[in-house]
Amino acid sequence: MQTLTTLTAPPERLLLVPSVESGLAELTRPVRDLLHAQALPPESAHLRIVLDAPWGYALDVLQTDATNAVVITRSPVREYLEDLWECGPAVLIAHPDSDPDLIDVLRRASVGDRWRDTPPGRPVLTPAERAVLRYVARGLSNKQIARRLDVIEGTVQNALSKIFQKLRVANRTQAALYYWGRLPRA
């Protein structure tokens, strides 16, 4: 008997409007496909499926333990996806139009291969700028960010100026909304 562990946020009672319900159905489709597959490889039993709902949940889980994690997200934000990948999951699936052979992906992941399916392109921010953006998105002040990154506040301020310019946002709130995929784009 094979067991796949699925990690999700703690259960809450929610009334889902149809658009949210269909969005959740789309996010969980790869998991349903896996659970209904008859040919799951025995070596995949140690893999953990992490549904990134809400966005940010997988980042919290991976920062604690990325071992054998198969992350499924629908975040369109390259910086966020790169942060997820750098945490070290075995698999990261984030491409909305993708339909990978999940059985093959699990087989490869179970023998130590890493695999990702994300939208093409690279993040526009450097790794250091991404770290600042990640902390801004979590609501930290410049002083708190400077302490965490072991830099002076002026360095954080300079990084924020570059981040605002590169992302074409006006302030911290817009930068945070961008990171969480909630900033409407023209």
Image (spheres, rainbow, N blue to C red):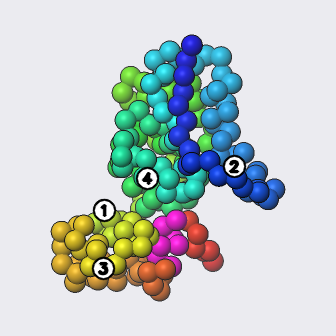
Determine the residue positioned at 30% across, 79% down.
142
In this view, 3 is above or below 92: above
Question: Residue 178 lies in magenta, yes or no?
Answer: yes
Q: What segment carries the magenta color? A: 174-180
N-term mark: 4 or 3 = 4
Residue 79 lies in quadrant: bottom left
Relative depth, front residue between 34 and 53 = 53
**Between tags 1 and 4, which lies in front?**
4
Which of disc 4 and disc 1 is earlier in sequence?
A: 4
Q: Quadrant of the C terminus?
A: bottom right
Residue lying at 38% horizontally and 22% vertically, measured from the top left: 111
Task: Using the numbered discs, state the Cα–Cα distance from disc 1 to disc 2 in whole angstroms.
Answer: 30 Å
The answer to whether the residue labelled 2 contacts the one labelled 3, judged by CB atoms less than 8 Å apart, is no
Near mark 3 (Cα within 10 A), the count class, few <14, some 14-19 or many ≥20, is: some
Say what amino acid the circle numbered 4 marks. Answer: Leu
Is disc 2 surrounded by few (<14), some (14 to 19) or many (20+) residues within 10 Å? Answer: some
Kindly indicate the quadrant of the structure image that contains residue 123. Answer: bottom left
- Choose top left, top right, bottom left or bottom right for residue 154: bottom left
Q: Nearer the viewer, residue 10 or 70?
A: 10
Q: Is residue 126 visible?
A: no
Number of numbered discs overlaid on the protein picture: 4
Calculate the distance from the C-alpha at mark 3 to the C-alpha at mark 1: 17 Å
Residue bearing mark 2: 24
The disc placed on residue 142 is 3
User: Is the magenta region chiefly helix, strand or loop?
Assistant: helix
Looking at the image, which residue sits at the far bottom? 170
Quarter of the figure with the N terminus: top right
Q: Is residue 78 magenta?
A: no
| Location of mark 1 (residue) | 127
